[in-house]
Every structure is written in C-alpha cells, then in structure tokens.
Image (spheres, grey):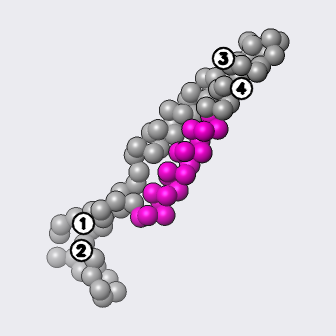
Amino acid sequence: MAAYMSPGPDLPYQINALVAFIAGMIFNCLLIWLIKHKSPKELKGYGRVMLFGCYFDIYLLCINYSFQQVIVFNHQPSSSHSPVQME
C-alpha cells in the first residue's frame, strides 16, 4: 500500500500561518523598539529579560512558519466513501 502525501497545507492554514507570522513580527519589533528607546532608566535591568522573550518569540515565529503541517494518507483518495481495504 503506497502512501499518498497531500501537496501541502490547505489554504486557510497557509493564510492563518502567514497572518500570525506578520502580526507577530510587527508587534515583537514594536516591543523591541519600545524596550530599547522608551524604557525608563529604573527598568533597564529588566529590559534584557523582556528582550530575550521578544527574540525567542521571533525565533519561534520563524520556526512555526517554516515548518507547516503535511497531511499523509495511507491510501489514494477516491470518490467512494467506503472503508479502507487492507491487502
């Protein structure tokens, strides 16, 4: 029995991944800019912790967008809705 791989994630999943990636990058870059330029001097010590969180989130955004799901079936798709027959 040959395995059949779909050509890729469905369009809604691709759109969702792209929107999440773009929104995450925009908001994380805005947060990095705010931390670096608008933080009061009293909070500069916490800036490194907040920046680490932003950089790690950007890393995870890139990983999530790069590796999207692939659906694998154990049989060729057919028009009938009969159960899979084992050979």
Q: What's the amino acid at mark 4?
A: Leu
How many numbered markers are drawn? 4
Disc on the earlier residue, 3 or 1: 1
Q: Nearer the viewer, mark 4 or mark 1?
A: 4
Disc on the earlier residue, 1 or 2: 1
Disc on the earlier residue, 3 or 2: 3
Quadrant where the N terminus lies?
A: bottom left
- Where does label 2 land, which residue? 76
Q: Secondary structure at mark 3?
A: helix
Residue 28, numbered label: none
Closer-to-camera residue (14/29): 29
Q: CA distance from mark 3 to mark 4?
A: 13 Å
Q: CA distance from mark 3 to mark 2?
A: 52 Å
Asked if residue 36 is among those painted magenta in the image, a careful observer would answer: no
Q: Nearer the viewer, mark 3 or mark 2?
A: 3
Quadrant in the rendering for residue 5: bottom left
Q: What's the amino acid at mark 3?
A: Arg
User: Main SS of the magenta segment?
Assistant: helix
User: In the image, is residue 54 above or below residue 72?
Assistant: above
Q: Secondary structure at mark 2?
A: loop
- Where does label 4 land, which residue? 34
Q: Secondary structure at mark 4?
A: helix
Circles 1, 2 touching at the beta carbon (< 8 Å): yes
**The magenta stretch spans which residues?**
10-28
Quadrant in the rendering for residue 3: bottom left
Q: Residue at x 56, y 27 (%)?
A: 55
Query: Where in the figure is residue 74, as x and y percent of width and height?
Result: 27, 68
Disc on the earlier residue, 3 or 4: 4
Residue 48, numbered label: 3
Q: Counting other residues with Cα less than 10 Å from the Cα at mark 2, is it few (<14), some (14-19), or many (20 or more)?
A: few
